[in-house]
Amino acid sequence: MPGVLLNLLAGKEMALFKNLNFSKLKEGLTKTRNRIFNSINEVISGKAVIDENTIEEIEDILISSDIGYEVVQSVIEEVKKKLKNESDRSGNNVLKLVKNELNQILVASINKTGTDLENSLIKYKPYVILIVGVNGAGKTTTIGKLAHNFKKSGLNVLVGAADTFRAAANDQLEIWAKRAGVSIIQKEHGSDPSSVAFDTIKKAIDEKIDVVLIDTAGRLHTKKNLMDELNKIRRVISKLLEYAPNETLLVLDGNSGQNAIMQSEEFSKVTDISGLIITKLDGTAKGGVVYQICSKKNIPVRYIGVGESIEDLLDFEPETFTNAIFNSNQN
Ligand SMILES: Nc1nc2c(ncn2[C@@H]2O[C@H](COP(=O)(O)OP(=O)(O)O)[C@@H](O)[C@H]2O)c(=O)[nH]1
Ligand SMILES: [Mg+2]
């Protein structure tokens, strides 16, 4: 009973529920696994020794999955270097080396900036997460899934519908809040997003809420607009809670390839981003973009979306992700 565990937490240990379902992850990454793992297997099969041409084919496969040219070059260079020192030039060994190099990218990116979420949740009440990203990236859906996951840990969750630009946005978040069984603060379409943020934080303090998730609008005509909007929301939040927001998570559509990289650069210029959520990995063969993002960005990937239902947001864990792509067993 995680709820009971958590309620005991007053300064003690807490067991935060982690959604790390390996079979769901594997299922979600099927298209990317076919593109990367199955294709590499095809080119190495039947070859006793892997020659330069085959390595080039592997290079093309990796690029075609959106791992990105530069990242692929460095991976291949490393693999070649290692092969020079080894007598085993079998396909399986090459596959293993590629897998290890790719995995290293994810491990390094997580180690750069580890967050101790459990301790932070104990320390900060309410713990405030601001969700940002362009329209259609999956913000609202992800908030529903996050609310569900936090609630499963026994935490009280409140969501704030600060995307007041789109008429349907309120309804959509309301549906998700109902599904997750959490409360929501919303105002009529067109009201000031920062006033929604204010009301949400106020209620969270009054009602001793554990986690606050705030939705925001993605479509703002100019970068200045977006910056002003997000800054205003942040200002209002920190007026009530000096330490908040605790996290600002940028949601990126895993289908959008190079655009995802650009968006993360643009948003970083506008506001501090503490983590990334990559959605829709179930719909694409180009999930290799996760490696590219981890390699290029100093911001850790926190969660990944592998479907449209409430259980489909998984904690991001490097080894598990790479094992799912390379069809390995999970230890
Ligand atoms: N297949 C799939 N669809 C997703 C995922 N996350 C979000 N979506 C879909 O993407 C669309 C846009 O999501 P929404 O949350 O409205 O994006 P927002 O505009 O950023 O709030 C919706 O149709 C969602 O069902 C995911 O992980 N997998
Ligand atoms: Mg939305």
Image (tube, rainbow, N blue to C red):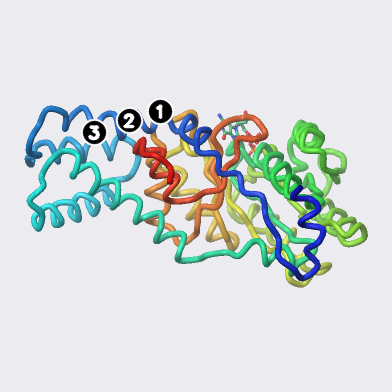
Q: Position of residue 3 (x, y in %)?
A: 79, 50
Q: Position of residue 94 (x, y in %)?
A: 18, 44
Q: Which mark is residue 35?
A: 2
Residue toward you, 162 or 92: 92
Residue toward you, 49 or 75: 49
The residue at the point 27 percent across, 51 percent down is: 70
The residue at the point 28 percent across, 52 percent down is: 101
Q: Which residue is mark 3?
A: 40
Q: Which residue is mark 1?
A: 31
Tag 3: amino acid:
Ile
Residue toward you, 225 or 313: 313
Question: As drawn, is 174 to the left or to the right of 116?
Answer: right
Question: As drawn, is 269 to the left or to the right of 69?
Answer: right
Question: As drawn, is 297 to the left or to the right of 65?
Answer: right
The residue at the point 73 percent across, 50 percent down is: 153
Q: In the picture, residue 236 is in which quadrant?
A: bottom right
Disc 1 from disc 2: Cα separation: 6 Å
Question: As drawn, is 101 to the left or to the right of 152?
Answer: left
Q: Is the C-beta separation of discs 1 and 2 under 8 Å?
A: yes
Quadrant of ligand 2 in image: top right
Position of residue 174 relative to residue 239, above or below, is above
Element under disc 3:
helix
Labels 3 and 1: the sequence-earlier one: 1
Residue toward you, 272 or 30: 30
